[in-house]
Image (cartoon, rainbow, N blue to C red):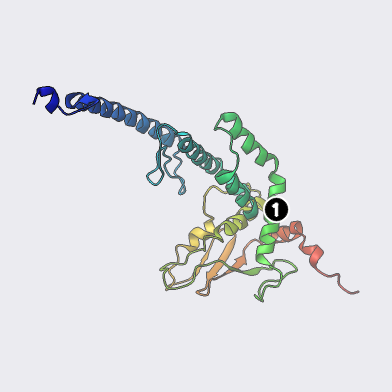
């Protein structure tokens, strides 16, 4: 056999294939290095010590990535950055639970603009101009949370919120060493706290992702003392999932009842 007949040739000779591989790997490593620096840059900008912050990546380990068609990856990146900006600007903390769901739907599935300063200022400005309306919605939501129509909890009343109320919001069962708020009720407690903060003239937007109430609940062992308090509430956690609240600021409670329409629900007294 001649040398040509014994050479391994698939378009290229073996030495040529090896050379192309080495060059391609070098370019890929350079591209990865550039991508890593770019991701580090954006994550450094997003870092704000929030409990909910997580790194954003162009290529996520559980997602497919096609270098020839990277638009899907950039779309996910854009949505993740919008989510982080929403948390950073504390927009979510202005909202009732219903409005929060609308916002999440927009962030997950809606038509989002490109991340620009103008777009961010427009979004935040839209919510800021609606603050009075958003506060009224939040007050009404808290009012309905604490005196639900048809409630079998005798402590609650449909007419107005009293000094004490019961909120079914805790996890039940033997899996939890400490008391824990059900994830579907967490937003309601945050709204409750935001309303009292706003009525107290301290601003409508809390500075923490979780309410102080939920944070204090999480400190309590299910086998120990289940009582605690915050600036506005005294509370007791029950193993049946109920949270017993006592409102410390009755002046703020009175204003909440008035704004939410509690007085209009009370029948007129017979002379």
**Going by the picture, which residue comes out furthest to the front?**
1
Percent from the top left, x then y, of residue 182?
52, 63
Viewer-nearest residue: 214 or 21: 21
Q: Is residue 135 above or below residue 74?
A: below
Q: Residue 264 vs residue 86: left or right?
A: right
**Going by the picture, which residue comes out furthest to the right?**
271
How crowded is the residue under tag 1: few (<14 C-alpha within 10 Å), some, or many (20+)? some
Quadrant placement of the N terminus: top left
The residue that appears at 41% across and 44% down in the rendered structure is 63
The residue that appears at 51% across and 66% down in the rendered structure is 228
Percent from the top left, x then y, of residue 136?
72, 52
Q: Residue 232 vs residue 139: left or right?
A: left
Q: Is residue 32 above or below residue 203?
A: above
Number of numbered discs on residues: 1
> From this viewpoint, is residue 252 visible?
no
Percent from the top left, x then y, of residue 117?
57, 30
Viewer-nearest residue: 21 or 250: 21
| Residue 147 occupies quadrant | bottom right
Quadrant placement of the C terminus: bottom right
Percent from the top left, x then y, of residue 101?
61, 52
Q: Is residue 124 above or below residue 185?
A: above
The residue that mark 1 highlights is 137
| Residue 42 occupies quadrant | top left
Q: Residue 36 vs residue 187: left or right?
A: left
> From this viewpoint, is residue 14 visible?
yes
Viewer-nearest residue: 101 or 89: 101
Determine whether the residue tagged by mark 1 lies in a helix, strand or loop: helix
**Going by the picture, which residue comes out furthest to the left?**
1
């Amino acid at each position: 056999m001649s040398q040509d007949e014994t050479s391994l040739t698939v378009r290229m000779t073996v030495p040529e294939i090896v050379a192309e591989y080495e060059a391609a790997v070098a370019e890929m490593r350079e591209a990865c290095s550039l991508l890593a620096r770019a991701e580090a840059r954006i994550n450094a900008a997003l870092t704000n010590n929030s409990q909910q912050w997580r790194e954003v990546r162009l290529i996520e380990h559980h997602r497919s990535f096609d270098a020839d068609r990277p638009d899907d990856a950039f779309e996910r990146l854009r949505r993740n950055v919008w989510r982080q900006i929403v948390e950073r600007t504390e927009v979510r903390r202005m909202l009732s639970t219903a409005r929060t769901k609308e916002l999440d739907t927009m962030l997950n599935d809606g038509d989002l603009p490109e991340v620009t300063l103008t777009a961010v200022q427009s979004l935040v400005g839209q919510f800021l101009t609606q603050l009075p309306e958003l506060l009224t919605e939040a007050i009404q939501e808290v009012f309905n949370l604490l005196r639900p129509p048809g409630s079998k909890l005798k402590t609650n009343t449909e007419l107005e919120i009293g000094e004490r109320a019961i909120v079914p919001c805790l996890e039940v069962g033997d899996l939890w060493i400490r008391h824990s708020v059900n994830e579907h009720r967490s937003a309601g407690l945050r709204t409750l706290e935001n309303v009292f903060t706003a009525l107290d003239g301290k601003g409508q937007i809390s500075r923490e992702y979780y309410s102080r109430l939920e944070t204090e609940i999480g400190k309590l062992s299910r086998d120990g003392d289940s009582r605690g308090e915050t600036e506005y509430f005294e509370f007791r956690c029950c193993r049946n999932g109920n949270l017993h609240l006592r409102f410390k600021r009755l002046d703020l409670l009175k204003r909440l009842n008035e704004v939410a329409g509690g007085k209009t629900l009370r029948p007129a007294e017979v002379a």
